[in-house]
Amino acid sequence: MTRRSPAIARVVEAREGEIGTKAARWRVPAAVMVLALMAAFLVPTAHASSAPAGPAEPDELIVGYRQASTPEQRAKARGRAGATAEERVVREGPNKGEVERVKLPRGKHRDTAIAELESDPAVAYAEPNWVYTKAATSNDPYYENGSLWGMYGDAFSPANEFGSQASEAWAGNHTGNKSVVVGIIDEGVQVTHPDLNDNAWVNPVDGPDGKDNDGNGYVDDTNGWDFVNNDNTVYDGGRKGNQDKHGTHVAGTIGAEGGNDTGVAGVNWDVTMIPAKFLGRRGGTLANAIKAVDYLTDLKTRHGLNFVATNNSWGGGGFSQGLLDAITRAAKANILFIAAAGNSGANNDTDASYPSNYDTTATTANPDGAAYDSVVAVAAIDSGGQLASFSNYGVKTVDLAAPGVGIYSTLPNNSYGSYSGTSMATPHVTGGAALYAASNPGATALQIKTAIMGSVVPTASLLDKTVSGGRLNVSGF
């Protein structure tokens, strides 16, 4: 079993003791739970348990330093463990300290190094560099032929009461708005896909001229950034499209262009999507996850974008103070963090799955938290309304469920296909957040989350399985 550092243990224990308040705030009374339904199968996306926590980059740690620590103090702290600085992950700024990725000497025991680093007064925390893995009426062909059940409602044909009810929202002329921005923290996205190209973000400041015109440290981040290869190519699908399938599929559920007589339709026909690619062939590291979250938060504050949410269909590793801090910075910028609950059929109340188990709310143990919990944890249901057999759940920690079995969406090389997983459920909710923001300009992140949670449809299979006891309903906003 991987041992938590004392600092991490204190925060986790404090969070576990306070989750019940969150559940009580959103819970739908049992008396209104009236619907009963069927099952599904697993496509791996993301599962992280607290013990064992999962894989990490060998001989690497993420070290967070206290604010105002000097380079000399940081060097002294690294010296305690014989570590060398490899990369700055977070630059010190207002209300945040420097964060580094460090390399340990060959053969150095990870837990020993963590203890040595955390014994230094300049160090706030040290943790493994965890590795994460992948967790109006439409005339679009896959919608019309009955394949796109996750977008259906019960009042239109094709009909499915357990869909997201997007078709009913469209019929009321709620189809989204390009002024609303969401981030896709995932694999890359084929931004040239004919069902995605009009909804891909184009940086208004930093064009392809070889210069960092907006000063954010990323040269020519025209459509987003690739943190795996450290370049501005957000799509690396290759001739056979073997890469970036997951990210491209997620993007299509959020915002494939609807009503264009092509392929599929997303929850939003019009939206702006920014890829922050941090998952590659071998998964993605904690260091790159932190950078991806901060990159998108900085774009909101730097460009003044109407940035409402990030989609996070991934998971793995254990608790990370560094990642929680980054998610909290996004929360303070009014950005929701919508996350897959995981695909291990496990109870997240007792076996924490990150990042969906994070809570950004300020507490005694986490005084630098936000005024609300920006994390929305999503389980998966099948087309019969049953909690998917693979889906994680948690009456205290998983907020709601959405369609996640047999979900058709965009794939690389201008193609389409069906995937299953909480990865597929999550973008339905992210799409719902964007759809609400389009119809309610100026809504805060908390208001958007409240609307999502307040409009769920009570579902028997989700009773005592999720905080709300219900499923996504984007027509109920």
Image: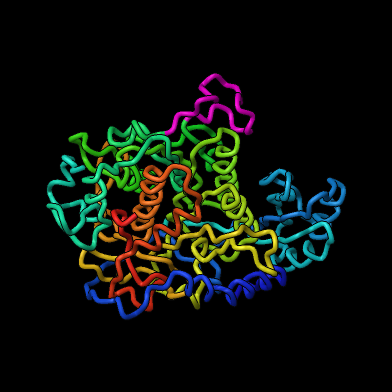
Figure quadrant of residue 26: bottom left
Residue 286 rendering spot, x and y as whole percentages: 58, 54
Residue at the limit of the structure toward the bottom, as seen here? 31
Residue ranking furthest to the top? 209
Write the residue at 35% across / 61% down.
455
Residue 429 falls in image quadrant: bottom left
What's drawn in magenta, residue-wise?
A: 201-222
Q: Is residue 193 inside the magenta stretch?
A: no
Q: Is residue 243 visible?
A: no
Q: Is residue 62 left or right of residue 353?
A: right
**Can I make out residue 66 in this image?**
yes
Residue 214: in magenta span: yes
At horizontal 26% and vertical 42% (from top left) the residue drawn is 173
Q: Report the coloring of the rendering.
A: rainbow
In the image, is 269 to the left or to the right of 21? Answer: left
- In the rendered view, would you say 106 is above or below 112? above
Q: Which of these two is toward me, 154 or 64?
A: 154
- Whether 413 is drawn above or below 28: the answer is above
Which image quadrant: the C terminus?
Answer: bottom left
Q: Main secondary structure of the magenta part?
A: loop
Residue 284 x/y as whole percent: 52, 51
- The total of numbered circles placed on residues is 0
Residue 15, given in percent of the width and then of the height, sits at 60, 71
State left or right for residue 397 relative to residue 200: right
Q: Which residue occupies 66% across, 57% down? A: 59
Which quadrant would the N terminus be assigned to in this image? bottom right
Which sits in the foreground, 262 or 14? 14
Q: Residue at x 55, y 72 (%)?
A: 50
The image shows residue 326 at horizontal and vertical percentages of 61, 52
